[in-house]
Image (cartoon, rainbow, N blue to C red):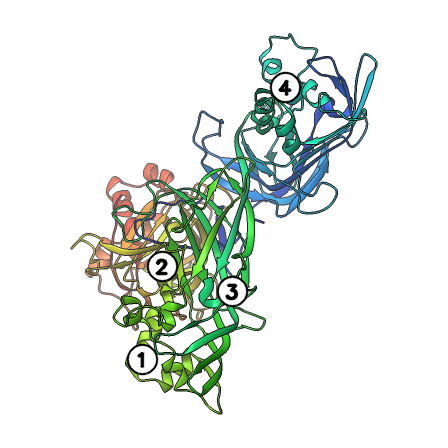
Amino acid sequence: MSQLRVLRPVFFFIVSLGLSLAFSPKFIAYAQTPPDTGTLEFTANGEDFVRQGFTSKDGWVINFDQVLVNLTDITAYQTDPPFEPGETEFLPQSTVALTGSYVIDLAEGDEGAEPIFVAQVEAPAGQYNALSWNMIPAAEGEMAGYSLWLAGTAEKDDQSLPFTIGVERGYSNLCGEFVGEARQGILQPGETAQLEMTFHFDHIFGDADLPEDDELNTMAPGFEPFASVAEDGTVNTDLTALQESLSEEEYQMVVEILPSLGHTGEGHCEYTDLSSLQFTANGEDFIRQGFTSKDGWAITFDRALVNLTGITAYQTDPPYEPGGEFGFQAETTASLTGTFVVDLAEGDESAEPIPVGETYAPVGQYNALGWQMVPAETGDMAGYSLWLEGTAEKEDQSLPFTIGVENSYTNLCGEFVGDERKGILQPGQPADLEMTFHFDHLFGDADLPEEDDLNVLAPGFEPFAGLAEDGAVTADLVTLAEALPEDEYQMIVDILPTLGHTGEGHCEYSELGTLAITANGEDFIRQGFVSKDGWAVSFDQVWVNLTGITAYQTDPPYEPDQNELSPLVSTALPGSYMIDLAAGDETAPPILVDEMIVPVGQYNALGWQMVPAEEGDMAGYSLIMQGTAEKEDESLEFTIGVENSYPNLCGEFVGDERKGILQPGQTADLEMTFHFDHVFGDAELPEDDELNTMAPGFEPFASLAEDGVIETNLAALAEALPEDEYQMLVDILPTLGHTGEGHCYYGE
């Protein structure tokens, strides 16, 4: 099942990708003060219509025994500006999500019952002014296959009809602030706040207490369409049965009104139909039936295991064409969370593609598909992303084989190309997308001419057969690298990334590694130092709030102030990170910000922004420095805040070692370095050194001390300092960021 929020997201893309994600900031330090939190409580409410019953627009008195809804992806947001469905853009600043799904009986309790408790979660304090959830068919239990299940009795004149009505479709709600007698979602530290998912069932049945021509009644089907399908005095129906039994006009009224059930009190939502998007994997007849390689080996497979993750479908506009003129611009995404080990050899010759998983996704045309094939962490194929077992026969030889592949591979593919179109998802109808694997790329195909491109590029089976010992082949990339001639081994590693397709549709292929992003305040922060004007400065905490952290592969290499950034690949960390550069002792390594799996290559440029935090202890500040400064017999405790934002776009790391050179399956790091001697100067350098002549020093801050304490920020400094001293400070602050000793472009 898909989940809206991922706690440690990683994302990679070719530079032309146009995706953006919003996540709450991450707090990173060895010892840190957590943000103020409280308890956010989620509730569901079917209101008096469900608990007390009501009379429909067409005179049926309806009472409910059960009103079951299956809810998932329940998520609360702090948005700025406040989200108004249909009026303002949805711009979440902070997100809190519930994982899993919840079956709720909205009819539970008597007439005076409170809204039904769903779940609660610890959350940062603030105003949660938007709420979303999905209502999708349950996978099991009494409402399996249905997202909504109504059971009760309807009475009119001398008729009494017990009813059960099931809804098989899924619906997504994205709602603004709760509208009602009391405000909701305002969470104070240490306290509890509620958010309510409200369901208006008068939208389906209408309300006899309202005028007949009220818009609610004109759009509501009423109960009569359901009563018309009664058999033996009972209504037992669902959307499938209603489509067959009702007139097209009546059925259309039902399906058009169902998405609008969800509200936040009387507050409205944006409504989206959801349908089942199924992901499959296919090794085709090459795997299920076997085939003859380009060099004459008849190959049959017992197992062909792949370990897949990051499976994501996209609706793109314009349609994505790998290597085409237009870049990748995703308007809607639908993902499977988790990792899936799939045996492509499963089933006989006539078997269908293998189901991998499904998610309920917004309707539309999914015309791009991405996934990663990565080494499994456990199980039979631990350490391998691909594991092939079978037998190869040629003339009088029969070689059982096991071949493992340790590397990771990523695929970003366009629309499925085959006998039918895939990925066109309509309301109430499932659609599928296929990850296709072409193993003839590896072994070649005897049915094609020898000079066919596929055969020219394919290594064939002979390189593997040449490693046989005692009549069996056991190999992986490590053993192949040692045993094969360099050109044969290179053919194998060059072709492996191209196994993935969407039918006959092509993909962008990149080998993967792990890129670790670190932050370093250097010894100036961890050990302290003496400023140009003689103050011995030591730091307790130095918080920076970083966002937009992006690594680039550039050609030509980016040189700040000399040439423009010409990125070939861009890879970004979504979200913002609050980092204490003073964390750890004098020997501590640079602080790990986050890691991401990305295409290999040389990352020779790095960009980020230092921006004011929106919540927590450093709300309103991009930089907060706390510590002690001593000079002669004076000791001053200081807290200095910086409210401004600063962008950095830096070239290659300059230091004792090179950074950012990422090999397949390996880890490389990139460092954001902060030079605080630019602000305070350095007593170990000559007085006329350019660093010292441009640094304000500590004295301007010391001049503001009261009772041995400095508490200041840029606004206060602008009022208190002479104009030239203040200008020195604001001129130097943008230059804090470096990559080691490498310089950056500092600008808007």
Query: For mark 3, does the 10 Å Cα neighbourhood hold few (<14), some (14 to 19), or many (20 or more) residues?
Result: many
Judged by depth in the image, the label closer to the viewer, 1 or 2, is: 1
At x 50%, y 66%, the residue is: 288
- Is residue 324 in view from this perspective? yes
| Front residue (pair 726, 374) | 374
Please give the label number shown on residue 221.
4
Amino acid type, label 2: Trp
For badge 3, the amino acid type reads Leu
Which residue bears the numbered disc 2?
A: 535
Q: Which mark is residue 344?
A: 3
User: What is the C-alpha distance between the residues marked 3 and 4?
Assistant: 48 Å
User: Disc 1 or disc 3, which is closer to the eye?
Assistant: 3
Compute the Cα span from label 1 to label 4.
69 Å
Q: CA distance from mark 4 to mark 2?
A: 78 Å
Q: Nearer the viewer, mark 4 or mark 2?
A: 4
- How far is the residue under mark 3 from the one under mark 2? 68 Å
Query: Hey, what amino acid is under mark 4?
Result: Pro
- Label 1 and label 3: CA atoms lie apart by 26 Å
Of label 4 and label 2, which has the lower sequence position?
Answer: 4
Secondary structure under tag 2 reads loop
Mark 3 or mark 4: which is in front?
A: 3
Dot 3 or dot 2, earlier in sequence = 3
Q: Which mark is residue 488?
A: 1
